[in-house]
Amino acid sequence: MSFLAIIVAAGTGSRAGGPKQWRDLAGRPVLRWSAEALLTTGASELAVVVAPGAEARAAEAMAGLGHWSAVVGGDTRAASVQAGLNALTGRPDARVLVHDAARPLLDAATIRRVLAALEGADAALPVLPVIDSLRRGADGLMGDPVGRDGLWRAQTPQGFRLGSLRDAYARWPGDAPPTDDVEVARAAGQAVALVEGDPRLMKLTFPEDFAMAEALIPRWTRVG
Ligand code: CTP
Ligand code: MG
């Protein structure tokens, strides 16, 4: 059941007013929430990808946890993921989950759904249905209709085999960076399975998202 994991935590949090990964969320640093979920669910090796100079910050946030190491990331999320992929020492057929530090409320059930889907597909990601109508628009005016049939909201952790995700990144055309990793796998011809996501896996993006995430944490898991 063991697997490898990467948490990308090298962003600057420009929309949140500063790096999100070190901020406190209900008594624990944001990064620590998903790190604990991955380690207690069976991650045997976890690469925590951070900005240059932030290794001590990571060590503080991860105090007391084992089987992880800090890796220096890059200017884009994709560059940070690749740094994590290079740092992992597992076999090419090992399963690897790539997760955003900015999605702290990860639970074991989601991790297991993504891992289980890798039995029948090259890659997998958790998704949520699009509930609201989608509207195209510009300059304050609505444009042509957009169907939402077959559209899903993508989350992380996204699952892969270590060797095939490395290969897929090596083959990525490279003009614009991809926004996530399943996009890279798919471009390389891999079959990507959709599994059920979790609304609590919301990505902390804006300052007000922290209060919303805290409200989603059961009282009994709060520290302090
Ligand atoms: N990330 C990363 N390296 C980068 C950019 C982003 O590791 N060069 C990580 C972030 O730390 C985050 C995840 O990718 O955990 C998703 O990115 P996002 O939510 O966009 O975070 P930031 O890039 O930090 O925020 P913003 O875009 O508002 O600056
Ligand atoms: Mg960003």
Image (cartoon, rainbow, N blue to C red):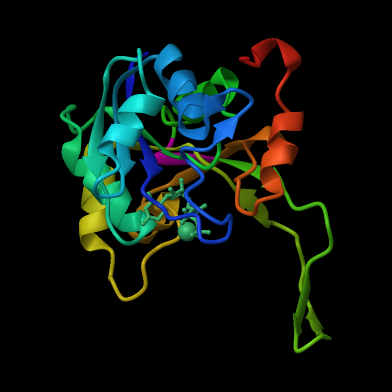
| Residue 39 screen position, x and y as percent | 40, 17
Q: Is residue 42 left or right of residue 82?
A: right
Q: Is residue 27 left or right of residue 91?
A: right
Identity of the residue drawn at 42% across and 31% down: 118
Q: Is residue 123 magenta?
A: yes
Figure quadrant of residue 221: top right
Quadrant of the image containing the C terminus: top right
Figure quadrant of residue 150: bottom right
Quadrant of the image containing the N terminus: top left
| Residue 16 screen position, x and y as percent | 58, 55
| Residue 159 screen position, x and y as percent | 41, 36
Please name whichever residue, 219 or 85, is drawn nearer the observer in this view of the structure.
219
Please name whichever residue, 98 or 146, is drawn nearer the observer in this view of the structure.
98
Residue 126 at least partly seen: yes
Our reading of the magenta stretch's main secondary structure is: strand
| Residue 201 screen position, x and y as percent | 62, 36
Vertical placement of 171 versus 63: above or below?
below
Identity of the residue drawn at 33% across and 22% down: 3
- Where are the magenta residues, as a range? 121-125
Please name whichever residue, 213 or 154, is drawn nearer the observer in this view of the structure.
213
Figure quadrant of residue 155: top right
Q: Is residue 210 left or right of residue 181?
A: right
Q: Is residue 59 magenta?
A: no
